[in-house]
Image: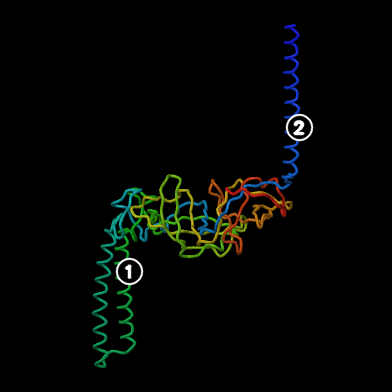
Amino acid sequence: MFLNLILRKKSLFLLIVLIIIILLFVLTKNSNEVLLVSEPPSNKKTVQVKKINVEEYSRKLIFRGYTEYSRSVTLKSQVDGKISSIYFKKGVHVKAGKKILLIDPEDKVAKVKEMEALLDQRKKEYKIANDLFEKGFRSELNLSKARVNFETALAKFEKSQVELNNTEIIIPFDSFLDVSYVELGDYLKKGDKIVKIVDLDPIYFTATVAEKDIGSIFIGQSGNIKLTNGITGKGSINYVSASSDTKTRKFRIQMEIENENSKILSGLTGEMEISLNPENSYFIPSSIVTLNEKGELGIKYIKDKIVKFKKINILSDTGSGYWIESFKDFYEIDIITLGQEYVLDGEEVNLVYQ
């Protein structure tokens, strides 16, 4: 009897548990049905959006190039003679007016004295002829001959002085003695090379520019250079070629840079950087750039919750993003920063602002 009582209680407990489970199932099902009815599913995709504003950006043009001396002159002998003294070493800087070499002047000194004596003689003869002509004792023809003899002697004297002066080789401008062609004791003839000098202050930086950029370059435009050895400098454009190279179709430009103490040498390679006038731009992450069905580069933005595609013109790549040309009449714009590859132009979407 005791056993039957236990079995009845156990059966009653199981029945109660079963009823509770059935009630919970029914209630849960009804609750889900109500939820589904009250909140129908949405087919619109969700994209992440960021608002960006117009900013002023100065686009930078960078050109590869090299430095060049601003002047180069090869000094040559103007007279024949033997080198008696050398006052320079190649590879050093010299000031304008410095004497760097002497050609033996001994025969030139003698020539000057000879021409000076002849000039003195012809001067006296001309004076006597002129006095006699004024008194009527000498014809005009004789006076003319005396005057010609005097002028010829004067010309020869001046020439002998020039030749004597030309025995001294003088530096015409502050310069760097780049190449020497002579040694002490060499015999020079008129026209023989003596030394090549170059002017390094100012120095030029020469580069070539593609036709798409040449319209942005003008005389007087300021810029910077940075050489491969780390030296930097500032200058301005002093030359823009009027025609392109027939092979490369690029234009040659030059920037003039102050080079005190000639710290920048000729022939060094590096980059020229020119900043253009500021223009209205947007800065965007490079990851949001996409292509449309025509293969055009652009971005997707939102207008009234509708996806729009806009072609872009990249002004500069900073490594962390792009500066692009701003769109007309768009001071600010909502760009899609996440999900742009999964939505189409003209599609309505849900927005989540970044």
Instruction: Give the quadrant of the N terminus.
Output: top right
Residue 31 location, quadrant: top right
In the rendered image, residue 194, in percent from the top left (x then y), is placed at 38, 54
The mark that comes first in sequence, 1 or 2, is: 2
- Confirm whether residue 46 shows in the render: yes
Q: Which mark is residue 7?
A: none
In the rendered image, residue 87, in percent from the top left (x then y), is placed at 28, 51
* Closer to the camera in the image, 72 or 114: 72
- In the rendered image, which residue does mark 1 sit on? 159
In the rendered image, residue 156, in percent from the top left (x then y), is placed at 32, 71
Which residue occupies 66% across, 47% down?
340
Q: Taking 26 as reference, is 281 above or below it? A: below
Q: CA distance from mark 1 to mark 2?
A: 129 Å
- Confirm whether residue 181 shows in the render: no
Disc 2 secondary structure class: helix
* Closer to the camera in the image, 274 or 5: 5
Residues tagged 1 and 2 counted as in contact (Cβ below 8 A): no
Q: Taking 110 as reference, is 129 above or below it? A: below
Which residue occupies 56% across, 48% down?
321
Number of the front mark, 1 or 2: 2
Q: Which mark is residue 26?
A: 2
Residue 160 location, quadrant: bottom left
Which residue occupies 46% across, 45% down?
228
Instruction: Look at label 1 and name its amino acid.
Output: Lys
Instruction: Look at label 2 and name its amino acid.
Output: Val
Residue 345 as seen in the image, left or right of residue 223: right
